[in-house]
């Protein structure tokens, strides 16, 4: 715990050097809140600091780091995000009421299966979450409303073949079967020539967001038009996007 607090403090002092002395007190407060497990308070403190220094890159990056922890890491529920399980509740019904996925509820609470008990306290956040892909910077932003929460690096299609537009997240698959259009053959997950990674999210026809067994392809145009992420990243995006509700916007440049 002492080592973790020291790392947080060093990171915040480094931020203070870059941002100027006027932010030192705010950064100390952020470090104290984070080390105490109060991510919501730390996020609010950074947002307040950003009002005084709009666009401060170091603050923006720190905010995105904390947002990612808040919306994806398992933690005990607080008074602000606790949900008490009622008779008849299922993960699916709770997720639908909050515009999120059952997988995200499992992730936030460290659940290994979908069994619930009456009066169980769950940590639940409010969605829906959307994805915004910027081809020029090879980034995928996770957004809620107009706010960008955090970002991922992506790989794109050869010769600009990744389609642009606004799509709605479609069918999602874990450990997907891959279809080789040229050979007209199905490639089972785990086969030596399977390259889709651990998750698939349908966008449009044969295009989708998926993982990859070639992490070196991230930040490059090497796919047949799909959007690639590292497997760990695509598993997080998979848990965030709700089929039929979450929007995926793909643009050439900001």
Image (cartoon, rainbow, N blue to C red):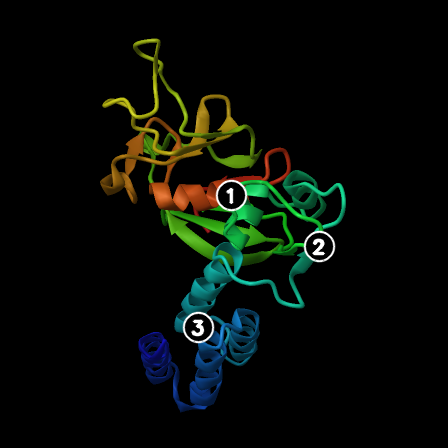
Residue at the image point whose x is 37% and y is 83% from the top:
16
Under tag 2, what secondary structure? Answer: loop
Left or right: residue 157 compared with residue 173: left
> Which residue lies most toward the right here?
87
Look at the picture and state if 81 lies above or below 135.
below
Query: Is residue 252 at least partly visible in the picture?
Result: no
- Horizontal side, residue 244 vs residue 201: left or right: right
Q: How many marks?
A: 3
CB under 8 Å between callouts 3 and 2? no
The one nearer the camera, 203 or 173, is: 173
Helix, strand or loop at label 3? It is: helix
Label 1, on which residue? Answer: 239
Residue 209 - label? none
* CA distance separating discs 3 and 2: 39 Å
Closer to the camera, 165 or 78? Answer: 78
* Residue 166 falls left or right of residue 10: right
Residue drawn at (48%, 40%) of the image: 238
Give the secondary structure at mark 1.
Answer: helix
Residue under numbered circle 3? 59
In the picture of the structure, the residue carrying the numbered disc 2 is: 119
Q: Could you tell me which residue is drawn at 30 percent across and 9 percent down?
A: 183
Q: Quadrant location of the N terminus?
A: bottom left
**Percent position (x, y) of residue 89?**
72, 43
Q: Is residue 18 visible?
A: yes
Q: Is residue 77 above or below residue 233?
A: below
Q: Residue furthest front?
A: 117
Q: Quadrant of residue 168?
A: top right
């Amino acid at each position: 715990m002492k080592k973790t607090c020291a790392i947080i403090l060093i990171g915040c002092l480094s931020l203070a050097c870059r941002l100027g002395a006027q932010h030192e007190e705010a950064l100390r407060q952020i470090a104290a809140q984070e080390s105490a497990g109060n991510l919501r308070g730390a996020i609010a403190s950074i947002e307040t600091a950003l009002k005084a220094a709009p666009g401060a890159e170091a603050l923006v990056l720190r905010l995105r780091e904390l947002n990612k922890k808040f919306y994806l890491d398992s933690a005990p529920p607080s008074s602000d995000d606790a949900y008490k399980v009622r008779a008849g509740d299922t993960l699916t019904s709770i997720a639908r009421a909050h515009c999120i996925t059952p997988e995200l509820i499992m992730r936030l609470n460290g659940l290994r299966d979908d069994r619930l008990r009456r009066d169980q306290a769950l940590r639940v956040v409010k969605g829906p979450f959307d994805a915004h892909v910027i081809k020029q910077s090879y980034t995928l932003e996770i957004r809620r409303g107009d706010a960008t929460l955090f970002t991922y690096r992506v790989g794109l299609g050869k010769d600009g073949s990744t389609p642009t537009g606004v799509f709605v997240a479609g069918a999602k698959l874990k450990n997907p079967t891959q279809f080789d259009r040229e050979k007209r053959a199905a490639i089972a997950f785990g086969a030596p020539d399977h390259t889709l990674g651990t998750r698939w999210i349908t966008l449009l026809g044969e295009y989708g967001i998926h993982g990859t067994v070639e992490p070196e392809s991230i930040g490059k145009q090497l796919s047949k038009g799909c959007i690639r992420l590292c497997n760990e990243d695509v598993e997080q995006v998979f848990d965030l996007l709700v089929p039929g509700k979450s929007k995926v916007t793909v643009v050439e440049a900001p």
